[in-house]
Amino acid sequence: MTVPDDRPSPSPGAAKQVTEETAAPAAAVGLSAPRWRGVLGCIVAAAMTVLDLSMTSTALGGIQETLHASLAKGALVISAYATAELITLSLSAFLTRVFSPRTYLTLLVCVFVGGALLAASAWNFESLLLARVIQGSASGAIMPFAYYSIVVLLPGKEHPKAISTFSIMVTGSYVLAPILCITLAEWASWRALYCVAAPLGVFALWLALPGLREMRQDESPLGRRANLVSIGAAVVGLFCAQYALDSGQSRGWFASGVVTLMVVTAVVAAAGFVFTELRSRNPLVDLRLLRLRPFLASCVFNVVAGVAVYSAFVLIPFYLTSLGFSVGEIGTVSLYGGTVQLVIATGLPLLLRRVDAYLVSTIGAAVFALAALLPLLAGSEPPYAVIVLALMARSVGSGLLLAALGLIATRALRSAQASSGSLLFNMARSLGGSIGAACCAAFLAIREAYHVRAGDVSAKAGRALALHDVFAVAFGILVLLAAAVLIGYAVRRVQARRPAPAKTGA
């Protein structure tokens, strides 16, 4: 079972993020109400982060207008959040060895809620951006910890039930988000949306803390040691890469010495991270897993999926706002997509058992591509039905794509490799998301300026033409992704039909 959501989340194999030696004691543990409370509390905390991201995406157009932010700045709300998630995600395995479970979850929830309250009271765009970075730094560790709690606190026979609960609750957040946007944002302000995290955070801790008393601290053989060079390289590299993506358009890209320096620093830091991780006795993650071809393919596909998903977080609110939709109206049309996604989530386990995961991924990418094709063909004044259909296609396609890719990654790993494997897989999606959100905004600005200058049209007409260009590029990328996954399926079928090599006697 997997969580078919639109943000950066762990693969469905995250429930196996434990070695066989750790799983055996967990399976032998008797089921108790406090343990289930602990798991449910962690799930509520994870759903809180999904709800927050979905509400932010829906209300992004209104936020930009209120704070007088450009599209490029508005995209920072998404891309900076994704980068902070990525950094914390890379450190999550180490952090579980440093803090006790109760302290760890309490710290994460308090940081996330604190960032949400800061966002609610943001006095300018810079303060909002800081708040989103704070929230992202906590969100990147909450989701993996929720899956880890399932493995440690519940016996193996209860894992499917817990993960199904996780999937439905997280997917349900996508239904609740537009409802809250319709009510709170319309009746009060988009600032009220960030206040929702406070009661949810308190409820999550009230549920989780009693059960986490029975959860042991991660007793990895690495202990509390970590390679400081790897940590520094990861943080510096990701920060420099994000800075270059976010400010490249305004500074003229490589015409700016600052942007060039940031790109060079990011490349050097990435090379240093790989070098130290491969040689270190205390690595943050096992990069050697990328030598497994099916797993490497799933990570590459996941980068592209992350680009598409996070670009949609930026593109769709801007597109609907340009058509004159209010935050409440955006929430209304998003509600259709969220409802369909919830229905798909309930039937996804059966689908993945009956249909090859590669084919499900191909179908998901193709349906996602349809979501980009519909507004492209509809012109500058698309009918309301086309907009609703496009959002429904996006929800169905992204849900199928992300779930099936996670299953492909899971099947490529042994249980002892699941911890590092899940970390790499989710880092791939978050990295793609960070790149996608920044590049989508930059490409929109470039194409809008081009159309206004070359076609001598108004800014509104230039914006409409630029949006069509972005939809065309998104359609092409998703079609190529569908074709690549389909080729992977064909290769697997050919390899499966090959006779096994005969065993020679001694």
Image (cartoon, rainbow, N blue to C red):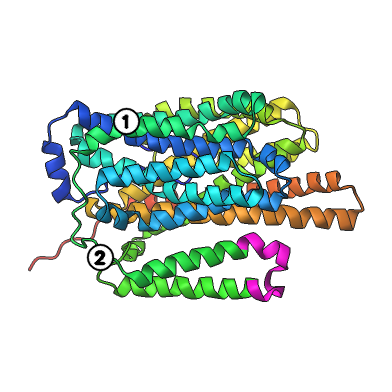
**Residue type at mark 1?**
Trp
The residue at which mark 1 appears reads as 206
- Give 448 or 282, whichever is nearer the viewer: 282
Which image quarter is the C terminus in? bottom left
Q: Earlier in the sequence, mark 1 or mark 2?
A: 1
- Give 94 or 450, whichever is nearer the viewer: 94
Position of residue 116 in the picture relative to residue 391 (left or right): left
- Taking the spot 34% from the left edge, 29% from the top edge, the residue there is 165
Residue 253 position, x and y percent, is 69, 68
Q: Is residue 377 rendered magenta in the image?
A: no
In this picture, which residue range is highlighted in magenta?
245-258
Question: For the residues carrying marks 1 and 2, which lies nearer the camera in this image?
Answer: 1
**Residue type at mark 2?**
Arg
- Give 456 or 127, whichever is nearer the viewer: 127
**SS state under label 1:** helix
Residue 415 position, x and y percent, is 23, 50
Callout 1 crowding tier (Cα within 10 Å): few <14, some 14–19, many ≥20: some
On the question of residue 209 being in view, the answer is: yes
* Vertical order, 179 against 485 (above or below): above
Check whether the beta carbons of the residues at disc 1 and disc 2 lie within 8 A of each other: no
**SS state under label 2:** loop
Which image quarter is the N terminus in? top left
Callout 2 crowding tier (Cα within 10 Å): few <14, some 14–19, many ≥20: some
The residue at which mark 2 appears reads as 225
Residue 321 position, x and y percent, is 73, 37
Mark 1 → mark 2, Cα distance in angstroms: 31 Å
* Vertical order, 101 against 195 (above or below): below
The kind of secondary structure the magenta stretch mainly shows is helix
- Taking the spot 50% from the left edge, 30% from the top edge, the residue there is 341
Position of residue 505 in the picture relative to residue 415 (left or right): left
Residue 311 position, x and y percent, is 60, 48
